[in-house]
Image (spheres, rainbow, N blue to C red):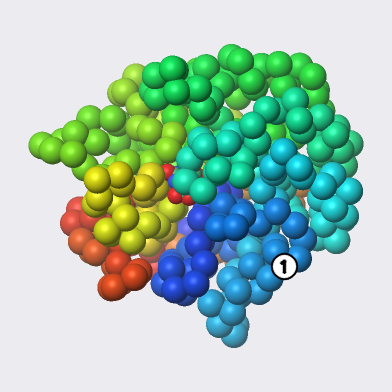
């Protein structure tokens, strides 16, 4: 039995670090395990221009303090009025790594998102030309579509024509949850990849209703049925360079989750690598873990692989029931459970 696993330092290709007190409370968890992370721009107001991204990057680095060895990779939140030239200039200046497309009202803080992808023609042409990745929250927002079908319908109605119209546009389909999305990304003759979260690998939609309503298992895209979880797992451990780690760690204070209208988002940053490793071990794919965690993402983004390593050791790690207090009290993913691996650093 493998007792220690040392891999190249990994990156998190999708994380919500929030702002203010919550940023102070959570940033260290991500920086402890990951060398770099793609920082989601869905603040209020969203990060839509270069100045806001630079200021947010500075706040993240300040929250981590001197000497933190962590690089936040900033993203630009697309709106119907996005400024194409400013985005391209921000990319050239090294501020924006990618653009994030939230269909309007698809998820937390997406009210300013894009109402119709046709409004983005100039932006998309430019991203394609300069090789800047488009990161997509892939769900339709049509409320007449069953919430469990919104990703599959997005793949059919939006992603399929998008890849046809922009054949060289680099796309990351974020936090995939369905067999349809996994198959599309696997098979497309297109520069497309996908991030996968620990929760979509470890639990299915039964977790939302396990003995009662479970707000801490609620995220978007919502958990799907078991057949989809198994398809997403196969994609993650397949060794395909198109699938890589993106936690979608999305903290909300306990009271905002345990509410009459609870927020979507699962906070998984404290034990992210241990949770992923559980999946790779169960799938007898420990030899593929490093590619998923530390190589595929950087290669897709065209960034150098990290120097240095991290080590995980076999040994019980208890996930606390709650982390932080007051305005920053959050219930982490797998709260109260015991993991079989420990992050050593
Ligand atoms: C995210 C959040 O809370 O910001 N929530 C979530 O359920 N994943 C938004 C998102 O990524 O959809
Ligand atoms: Zn997210």
Measuring from the top left, give residue 195's x and y in whole percent: 54, 39
Residue under the image location 81 percent in, 29 percent down: 121
Whether the residue carrying mark 1 lies under 8 Å from ligand 1 is answered with: no
The image position of residue 68, as x and y in percent, is 58, 77
User: Which residue in the structure is indicated by mark 1?
Assistant: 54
Residue 287 visible in the current orientation? no
Total marks placed:
1
Is 66 rendered above or below residue 330? Answer: below
Q: In the image, is 53 to the left or to the right of 104?
A: right
Q: Residue 329 at what x, y percent from top left?
A: 30, 67
Where residue 34 sits in the image (x, y, percent)?
53, 61
The answer to whether residue 259 of the structure is visible from this angle is yes
Q: Nearer the viewer, residue 227 or 51?
A: 51
**Counting other residues with Cα less than 10 Å from the Cα at mark 1, is it few (<14), some (14-19), or many (20 or more)?**
some
Residue appearing at x 76%, y 30% in the figure: 119
SS at badge 1: helix
Residue 285 occupies quadrant: top left
Quadrant in the picture for residue 157 = top right
Whether residue 143 is situated above or below residue 245 in the rendered picture: above
Q: At 64% across and 67% down in the image, what residue appears?
A: 56
Query: Hey, which residue is sitting farthest left in the picture?
Result: 211
164 up-or-down from 58: above or below: above
* Residue found 59% across the figure and 85% down from its top: 66
Q: Quadrant of residue 305?
A: bottom right
From the viewer's side, name the closer residue of 169 and 265. Answer: 265
The answer to whether 251 is drawn above or below residue 82 in the figure is: below
* Residue 12 as seen in the image, left or right of residue 52: left
- Which residue is at the front of the view, 296 or 56? 56
Q: Quadrant of the C terminus?
A: bottom left
């Amino acid at each position: 039995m493998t007792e220690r696993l040392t891999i190249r330092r990994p990156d998190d290709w999708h994380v919500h670090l929030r702002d203010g007190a919550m940023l102070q409370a959570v940033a260290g968890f991500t920086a402890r395990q990951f060398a770099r992370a793609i920082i989601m721009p869905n603040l209020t107001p969203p990060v839509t221009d270069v100045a806001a991204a630079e200021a947010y990057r500075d706040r993240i680095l300040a929250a981590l303090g001197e000497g933190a060895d962590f690089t936040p990779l900033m993203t630009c939140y697309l709106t119907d009025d996005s400024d194409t030239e400013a985005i391209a200039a921000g990319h050239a200046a090294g501020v924006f790594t990618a653009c994030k497309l939230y269909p309007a009202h698809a998820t937390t803080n997406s009210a300013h998102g894009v109402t119709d992808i046709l409004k983005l023609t100039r932006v998309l042409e430019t991203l394609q030309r300069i090789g800047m990745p488009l990161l997509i929250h892939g769900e339709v927002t049509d409320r007449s579509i069953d919430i469990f079908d919104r990703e599959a319908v997005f793949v059919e109605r939006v992603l399929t024509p998008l890849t046809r119209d922009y054949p060289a546009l680099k796309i990351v389909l974020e936090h995939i949850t369905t067999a349809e999305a996994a198959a599309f990304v696997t098979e497309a003759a297109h520069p497309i990849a996908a991030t996968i979260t620990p929760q979509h690998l470890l639990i299915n939609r039964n977790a939302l209703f396990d003995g009662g309503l479970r707000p801490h298992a609620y995220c978007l895209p919502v958990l799907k049925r078991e057949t989809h979880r198994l398809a997403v797992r196969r994609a993650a451990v397949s060794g395909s360079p198109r699938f890589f780690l993106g936690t979608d760690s999305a903290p909300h204070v306990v009271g905002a989750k345990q509410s009459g209208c609870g927020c979507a988002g699962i906070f998984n940053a404290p034990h992210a690598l241990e949770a992923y490793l559980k999946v790779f071990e169960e799938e007898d794919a420990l030899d593929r873990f490093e590619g998923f965690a530390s190589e595929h993402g950087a290669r897709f983004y065209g960034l150098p692989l990290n120097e240095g390593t991290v080590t995980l050791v076999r040994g019980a790690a208890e996930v606390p029931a709650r982390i932080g207090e007051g305005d920053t009290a959050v219930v982490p993913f797998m709260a109260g459970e015991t993991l079989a691996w420990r992050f050593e650093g």
